[in-house]
Image: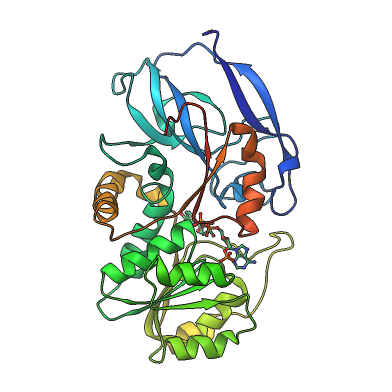
Amino acid sequence: MHGITNRQVYLSSRPTGVPRAENFSLRVAEVPALAEGEILIRNHYLSADPAMRGWISDVGGYWPQVAIGETMRAFAVGEVIESHHPEYTVGDRLMGIFGWQEYAAVSDKHVLLKVPDGDLSLSLYLGVLGLNGLTAYFGLLDIGAPKQGDTVVVSTAAGAVGSCVGQIGKLRGCRTVGIAGGPAKARQCLEEFGYDIAIDYKSNVNLDEALQAACPNGVDIYFDNTSGPISDAVMRQLRIGARIVICGTASYSSWNPWNSGPRPERHLIVKRARMQGFLATDYAPRYPEAVLTLANWVRRGEVRYAEEILEGVERAPESIERLYRGEHTGKLLIKLPAAQS
Ligand SMILES: NC(=O)c1ccc[n+]([C@@H]2O[C@H](COP(=O)([O-])OP(=O)(O)OC[C@H]3O[C@@H](n4cnc5c(N)ncnc54)[C@H](OP(=O)(O)O)[C@@H]3O)[C@@H](O)[C@H]2O)c1
């Protein structure tokens, strides 16, 4: 034992829909002694991600379900304060799956990225240089395969992933159309994230008409973060050879019973379109390459980002609900005392 106390947020009850603060509890535990091959990380920032809903849901997902009583699985960034692993030394800054807690004693399987030394804030490695930016990068460039002049439509366009997709699209010479909820987010899409057109789906706009006007030649790439009625409307505007990147399903209020709705197959046949889901974590071996490129874009001001920061591990439980209510701006993070700036 280290005599270090660790504040952890754990799953105390299983939610049926979007997780609420009441589904989590806070406890104090002692940091265990490290086994051979493990490292001890002091977390600086914790991430809140829509995906966390799937990790604790009763409906099976791509990773094992978090058990009741288990510290909540979460992406985090921190620094190594003790190492029993040959590849990591004290002072290394790492991004990985370190949980909603102040300290994490983990094996190397939990590490996703060694943060390069440099001028950029550690918090960015959970957002524009972390899973969100990487999701945008691989989803758009690998699955969407943008070409100069393509029209790219993005849902949750002002969010952490969506805002980055739009800007990478512009860097590839595309026309970008963002769909976001509320006038403030629509304005942010235009003024901060460089979208050519922004559609506020929460206004009383007719989405079909707005999309037709925004995409007179049709949609070449749809980066889908929502599914639901927004996607149904975009499907009706596809262009021949369109690519639909299935990234998230933020609009589903429930996964049980399973969602049903308009079926896209006919649109896919008529437009010879391709629809493909992907997981950014499958691209882990290519993270260093992507982070280097994203970091250069951020340094040059070609990719901008927004962050909203809650202070203290005790704020983590409210964060997922906040994400799904769309109340946050950009990347929602939890800052811990270890983070100095
Ligand atoms: N496939 C992958 O590997 C991967 C990795 C990371 C993230 N994702 C997915 O990418 C998407 C965006 O993630 P993010 O971290 O950047 O979150 P985010 O977009 O910053 O936040 C989630 C957004 O979902 C929107 N939303 C919530 N309820 C909605 C509804 N009923 N209809 C339409 N929109 C709704 C809200 O945007 P508005 O305020 O604009 O409504 C909210 O801001 C999520 O679906 C997430 O699961 C996938």
Q: Which residue: 24% across, 56% down?
A: 300
Image: 233 above or below 247 = below
Q: Which residue: 31% across, 42% down?
A: 120
- Residue 37 visible in the current orientation: no
Q: Quadrant of the C terminus?
A: top left
Q: Position of residue 229 (x, y in %)?
A: 62, 77
- On the picture, is 108 further left or further right than 61? left
- Residue 148 visible in the current orientation: yes
Residue 145 falls in image quadrant: bottom left
Image: 277 above or below 67 = below
Task: Please state which of residues 280 and 274 is positioned toward the viewer in this rendering.
Answer: 280
- On the picture, is 314 further left or further right than 156? right
Looking at the picture, the colour scheme in use is rainbow
Task: Please state which of residues 74 and 328 is positioned toward the viewer in this rendering.
Answer: 328
Image: 102 above or below 309 = above
Q: Which residue: 56% across, 72% down?
A: 183
Q: Position of residue 179 (x, y in %)?
A: 51, 73
Image: 193 above or below 286 = below
* Count of residue discs: 0
- On the picture, is 312 further left or further right than 192? right
Q: Position of residue 293 (x, y in %)?
A: 24, 53
Q: Quadrant of the N terminus?
A: top right
Residue 272 falls in image quadrant: bottom left
Q: Which residue: 67% across, 48% down?
A: 57
Which corner quadrant of the figure contains ligand 1?
bottom right
